[in-house]
Image (tube, rainbow, N blue to C red):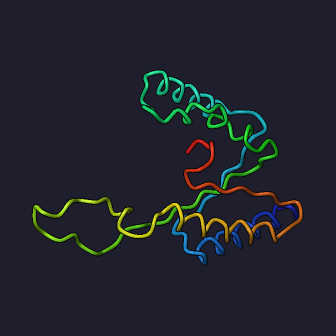
């Protein structure tokens, strides 16, 4: 293993530990090629078909071309970091027809704010690891295809 690969692996391990430290339950990194792969092109085609059938309803922002290729958002992208946060709560909803059912992600604070705060912490930590590190983070707010 080359020295540069050892450095990358070390940073990935540290990043995974930092993601857990700020509260994320899952973590992953995927490399981004300079050109769209066949799998990405298939996803783009499927998204176009989905949009063509009108499944986006009044969410016109879903047709933004940037959603189809992360390189349009960040041309210098080399990796995408994905994290997940479990919002399950053991609390039970009250019994009775007079109580509505609310999805568990809606029981606590707005997940956009919770995840945004954690992503900001993780991003600031990551950028502090080297002057050549640039990062962006989104919680349903950017044009990145999820």
- Residue displayed at 62% across by 37% down: 67
Where residue 15 sits: x, y (%)? 69, 69
User: Which quarter of the image is occupied by the C terminus?
Assistant: top right
Choose top left, top right, bottom left or bottom right for residue 35. Answer: top right
Query: Could you say where residue 18 lies in the image, as x and y percent from the top left?
Result: 66, 74
Quadrant of res 16: bottom right
Q: Nearer the viewer, residue 17 or 131?
A: 131
> What residue sits 80% from the left and 41% below the top?
75
At 74% from the left and 37% from the top, the residue drawn is 72
Kindly indicate the quadrant of the structure image that contains residue 1: bottom right
Task: Name the foreground residue: 5 vs 134.
Answer: 134
Q: Can you name the residue that lies furthest to the left here? A: 96
| Residue placed most toward the observer, 139 or 3 | 139
> Where 92 sits versus 101, above or below?
below
Q: Residue at x 57, y 55 (%)?
A: 139
Residue 137 appears at what percent x and percent y? 66, 57
In the image, residue 101 above or below residue 73: below
Q: How many marks?
A: 0
x%, y% of residue 66? Answer: 67, 36
In this rendering, position of residue 1 left or right of residue 51: right
> Which residue occupies the extreme bottom position in the image?
21
Q: Is residue 79 above or below residue 58?
A: below
Residue 105 as seen in the image, left or right of residue 136:
left
């Amino acid at each position: 293993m080359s020295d540069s690969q050892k450095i990358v692996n070390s940073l990935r391990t540290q990043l995974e530990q930092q993601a857990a430290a700020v509260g994320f339950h899952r973590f992953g990194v995927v490399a981004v090629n300079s050109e769209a792969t066949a799998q990405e092109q298939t996803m783009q085609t499927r998204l176009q078909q989905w949009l063509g059938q009108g499944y986006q309803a009044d969410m016109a922002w879903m047709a933004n071309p940037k959603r189809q290729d992360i390189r349009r958002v960040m041309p210098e992208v080399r990796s995408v970091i994905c994290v997940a946060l479990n919002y399950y709560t053991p609390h039970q909803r009250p019994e009775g027809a007079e109580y509505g059912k609310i999805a568990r992600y809606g029981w606590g604070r707005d997940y956009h704010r919770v995840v945004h705060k954690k992503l900001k912490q993780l991003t600031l930590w990551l950028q502090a690891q080297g002057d050549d590190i640039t990062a962006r983070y989104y919680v349903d707010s950017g044009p990145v295809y999820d």
